[in-house]
Each structure stands twice: as structure tokens, then as C-alpha cells.
Amino acid sequence: MSLPLRIAWAVFAGLCALMLLGMAALHIASTTVRARIDLVPGAQVSMVVLRLAPDAPRLSMEFEDPAQAHPPMGYWRSRPELGEWRPIRKDGSLRFGNPGETVKLRVVDQAQAQIFEALPDGGRSEGLVHRDLVRFVDDGDARTFRWPPLLASRSIPAGRSALEVSVLEVGDAIRGESVTLVAEPPLGFKRGTGGAIDWLWYLYFWPAYALVLGITGVVLARITRKSSAAAP
């Protein structure tokens, strides 16, 4: 095999290895972690997360609503105790007529403890109602939330760590309900971190890169075969 072909194969192998490593990193950076927790003051759960770079907790809750699974005539039944997303924006805040039952969680990682509170019903999928969690601001008004929310500290270190979550306060109407606590990943198709791992976002288009590498591999194989056949 000629030296140019050896170099071409080495570059090709390096690109394939880089893509495989990038895909593994993308999987880590985009993996969502879920855990069940009962909404009872004092209830606790530990969530193990893996991060490629320091990150902030991004949390939400999923409430079950089986009546939504097969809504007649496209009608989605509401759970008023979870609030309604009809905000009035004013002076850097959002005010809700129905903010939903209170949920406050204490989240402890390796660096610090932070308190989060639940926003009203912010989205629905089949059989589920979603409520995002934001940093708690003690303004004395349960109907008003700072907006944009106070950013959570990038307190989750790179590597494997645990988020210890405990229930501090919950409204009577949903007390005792079992919900799914969601630790959102730092990277998503519609969201980046503004940090060092954002380049991984381009790997969401990996089928195009794989196609190019596949074609390149076929071409190199044909050239190598012809070169070997022509060799004395």
C-alpha cells in the first residue's frame, strides 16, 4: 500500500473514532434522568447524574392525568390544582391567577443546597402534565414568579454525582401524590448550555456524517483494491 493511501486510511480511521467518541459524549450530555417521589414533606430521592462539564440543575415534574390519554373530540381535561399557564407579565415577573398547588423542593449536590418551586402547568403530553421547577424567590406572593427565573448555580461538577432531593412543602390537594421528578440534560436539540460542550449539538445530524464517512470508506476500499491489483 502506498504512503498516500496509508495516510488516507489513517485519517479515515481517526475521523471514525472521533465520531464514535462524539456520539458517546452526546449520549451522556443529552440523557434525561427520572425518579419517582411522593409529594409528602420529608420525602427524599437521590438522582445520579453524569456531566461532561459543570452544570446547573434543570428540574421538572410529571404528574399523571390518565383522562388525557384518550381525550374525546380532542378535549384535554384540566387539573386545576396544577395551575394554569395564563400569566400577566409585569416588571420582571409573571403573575398567575391560578399558580397551582405549592411544591417546594430542596436540592443538594456536592457544592450547595438550593430551593426550587413549581411553576403552573406548563405543558402536556399523553397522560402527563408537566410543571417546571425554578429557583425559589421569597417575595411573599405565591402567585408571582420572577421572570426570567433566577438562574440556578452551576453547582453540579463534571463527572458522576448525586442530587439529593427532598420535599419541603406541598399543597393539600396534591399531598401524597406520586410524581416523576425529571433532571433535564444540559444539551437538547432545541437547547444548549452556552458552554464548552455545545459543539456536540452538531452530532444530532450524525446520519449525514455517517453517510459521508461510508462513501469515503467505499471509495478508499476501491482505490486500495485497484492499487493492490496493479502492484507487480
Image (cartoon, helix red, strand yellow):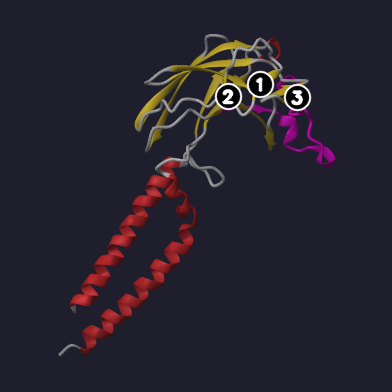
> Are the residues at dot 1 and dot 3 in contact (C-beta closer than 8 Å)?
no
Category of crowding for the residue at label 3, using alpha-carbon neighbours closer than 10 angstroms: few (below 14), some (14–19), many (at least 20): some
Residue ID at (31%, 76%): 221
Task: Estimate the x, y position of residue 115 in percent, counting from the top left.
Answer: 53, 16
Category of crowding for the residue at label 2, using alpha-carbon neighbours closer than 10 angstroms: few (below 14), some (14–19), many (at least 20): many
> Are the residues at dot 1 and dot 2 in contact (C-beta closer than 8 Å)?
yes
Category of crowding for the residue at label 1, using alpha-carbon neighbours closer than 10 angstroms: few (below 14), some (14–19), many (at least 20): many
The CA span between labels 1 and 2 is 9 Å
Provide the residue span drawn in magenta. Answer: 60-88
Q: Does 103 appear above or below 147?
A: above
Q: Which residue is mark 2?
A: 134
Task: Estimate the x, y position of residue 104 in percent, counting from the top left.
Answer: 58, 15
Residue ID at (38%, 36%): 53
Front position in the image: 22 or 218: 22
Sequence-wise first label, 1 or 2: 2
The answer to whether residue 61 is left or right of residue 154 is: right
Q: Which residue is mark 1?
A: 145
Is residue 181 something that shows in the picture? yes
Magenta stretch encompasses residue 78: yes
- Outermost residue, right side: 73
Observer-side mark, 1 or 2, equals 1
The CA span between labels 2 and 3 is 21 Å
